[in-house]
Image (cartoon, rainbow, N blue to C red):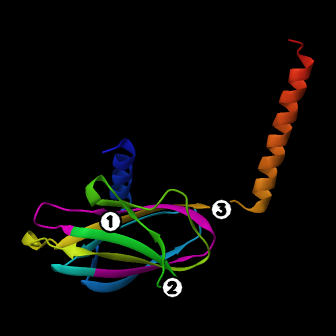
Amino acid sequence: MTLRTLGLLAGLALASSAQAVTLQLVDTHYLGAFDGGELYGELFAVADAGTIDHALSFDITGGLYAGSGVFDLSLGNITDITGLSAIIFKGASSTPYVTFTPVSGGDLLMLPTGTYFGVGNYTLQIEGEAIGSGLFGLPAGSYIIGAATLAVPEPETWAMLLAALGLVVLRVRAAGKADPA
């Protein structure tokens, strides 16, 4: 397991709320609205064993880049999910917008690096099989969703960055001409 994966898992655990959202096997839930600069984490519990089909919707109110992960929080045979998958759809489209990729044996799913989200409504489709026994009052399966968002810079910000870079280049050239080697 890489250091990056360990860091993400620690961040997911810290960012997740202490209170789990309990969902039925087939269920929907609204995650919220995001416009960049947010950290999101939430724990979802699946009470009963069976096939999971969760539609978790969210809104993007300003273009942003997001890093996100879905982690199967398994405790041996007590709470576990097999075949965990996560796909994001935009609006009412049935064509996947982006698919999470498995990392470290499939218990962790990650968005591809540099995933961009424009303004709109999205649905995160979570599927899998909750196979835990649910002993001791624990759920048959549980997973954590964690995300970090970064707003896309405004055109004025890009213009200032390029102007500053141009001034640095001019300064370096002037210093090179003044220094006879």
Q: Which mark is residue 3?
A: none
Residue 161 percent location from the top left of the image: 77, 48
Q: Which mark is residue 152?
A: 3
Residue 18 percent location from the top left of the image: 30, 65
**Residue in view at x 34 percent, y 43 percent:** 2
Q: Which mark is residue 144?
A: 1
Residue 103 percent location from the top left of the image: 34, 55
In the figure, 146 relative to 26: above or below? above
**Residue in view at x 28 percent, y 67 percent:** 143
User: What residue span does the magenta drawing correspond to?
Assistant: 53-81
Q: Are marks 2 and 3 in contact (CB under 8 Å)?
A: no
Q: Amino acid type of disc 2?
A: Ser
Neighbor class of circle 2 (other Cα within 10 Å; few <14, some 14-19, many 20+) is few
Could you say whether the residue bearing mark 2 is in a helix, strand or loop? loop
Of callouts 2 and 3, the N-terminal one: 2
Horizontally, is 30 left or right of 20 in the view? right
Nearer to the camera, 38 or 164: 164
